[in-house]
Image: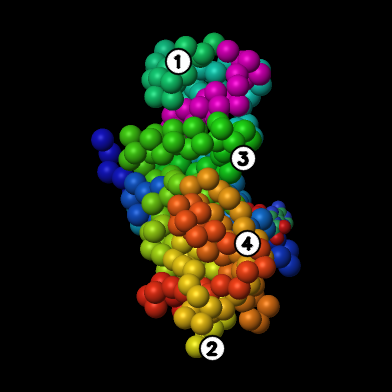
Amino acid sequence: MKNKLDLELVSLTKRYGQTLAVDEISYHFGVGTYACLLGPSGCGKSSTLRMIAGHESVSSGAVTLGGRDISNLPPAKRGTAMMFQNYALFPHLTVIDNVAFSLKMRGVAAEERRKRAMSMLDLVDMAALSDRLPAQLSGGQQQRAALARALITEPDVLLLDEPLSALDPFLRIRMRAELKKLQRELGITFIHVTHGQEEALALADEIVVMNNAIIEQAGRTRDVFEAPKTAFVALFLGSHNVVSMPEGKVAIRTDAIRLTKPEAAKLPGTITNIEYQGTHVALTAAIPGNQDVTALLPDKDFFGNPKDVGEAIGLDWKAEAAHALAS
Ligand code: ADP
């Protein structure tokens, strides 16, 4: 097995005319990591991914792989491969010919192409459907074919642009597990663009949260979730409250909030909404200063001492559960 290479973005910048889409971002992806680029629409995720892939020119800065500047190489010479959102399979080619296509471009002989394409199709559990056309496949099967096609060049880094968005919710969760399994088996770096925080948390070893063309916060997924540095990151990842306290703005996880009597609490509140979520109950209260706080309570705790909308309550948390935020 060849040595795996690490990918680094160095002050990477993308301008489209007057639009600054990516603003001097720098990040080092660990070798063999599953990384998610996460952020709202328009924050620069796809531009970043396309610059890594070589499908978009770099305005300034660099992309390096194993220390080598690949910024100006054509896509096929970089050691990266891309799987597109709509899979971009050739409709007139069978699955196996789709998968073998890039080998054909590289002048690999027909028999060798077929052998390598079949082994890739085996990897994604699609060998039995190798002679079908893309239109004869389900969404999940098309995705597997697209994965096999991207992986056949044995890239060091696989780039995935919103790979699950075309699938229905049930299939999305199944394919999510398959992507993770495949990444573990191959041991290569996957960089996956998504605007879904749940998807990113479920998949990523490392998470890069982008906003307005910059990286707001990045690092190991759990480190970012446990200690968001800005209100944007706390709110975008979800499951956090952002509250202005006399000592400054803080983030507090919804599951760290407990109910007490109003006079004993850090904050008094009035219940505005109660949402049953099966294992938990999400209770939202209005607090002074026109703010909302949500407490995620285990269902047994809530139903052991049920509350109603309009009731006055106290909201409490352990001091260490509150993380100071940069404004
Ligand atoms: P995301 O993937 O996070 O939705 P994009 O990277 O697609 O964000 O876009 C970032 C910004 O760059 C947006 O303001 C978008 O309108 C702009 N943009 C993206 N592609 C182009 C393009 N080809 N020409 C001009 N502007 C673009």
What residue is drawn where x is 58% and y is 13%? Answer: 132
Question: In this view of the protein, can residue 28 be seen by the observer?
Answer: no
Distance, label 4 to label 1, CA atoms, is 57 Å
Q: Regarding mark 1 in the picture, which secondary structure is present there?
A: helix
Task: Assess whether residue 139 is covered by the magenta stretch.
Answer: yes
Could you tell me how far apart the alpha carbons at marks 1 and 2 are, in whole angstroms?
62 Å
Tell me which label, 1 or 2, sits earlier in the chain. Answer: 1
Q: Name the residue under label 3.
A: 165
Which mark is in front, 3 or 1? Answer: 3
Disc 1: which residue? 127
> Is residue 194 placed above or below 182 in the rendered structure?
below
Occupied quadrant, residue 42: bottom right
Few, some or many residues within 10 Å of mark 1 (<14, 14–19, 20+): some
Q: Which of marks 2 and 3 is nearer the N terminus?
A: 3
The number of numbered badges drawn on the structure is 4
Say what amino acid the circle numbered 4 marks. Asp
Which residue, given by chain and number where applicable, does mark 4 sit on? Answer: 308
Range of magenta residues: 132-155
Q: Which of marks 2 and 4 is in front?
A: 4
Disc 2 target residue: 246
Q: Main secondary structure of the magenta part?
A: helix
Q: How far apart are marks 3 and 4 (CA)?
A: 38 Å
> Which residue is depicted at the point 55% across and 35% down?
172
Q: What residue type is labelled 1?
A: Ala
Res. 226 mark: none
Callout 4 secondary element = loop
The answer to whether the residues at label 3 and label 4 have Cβ atoms under 8 Å apart is no
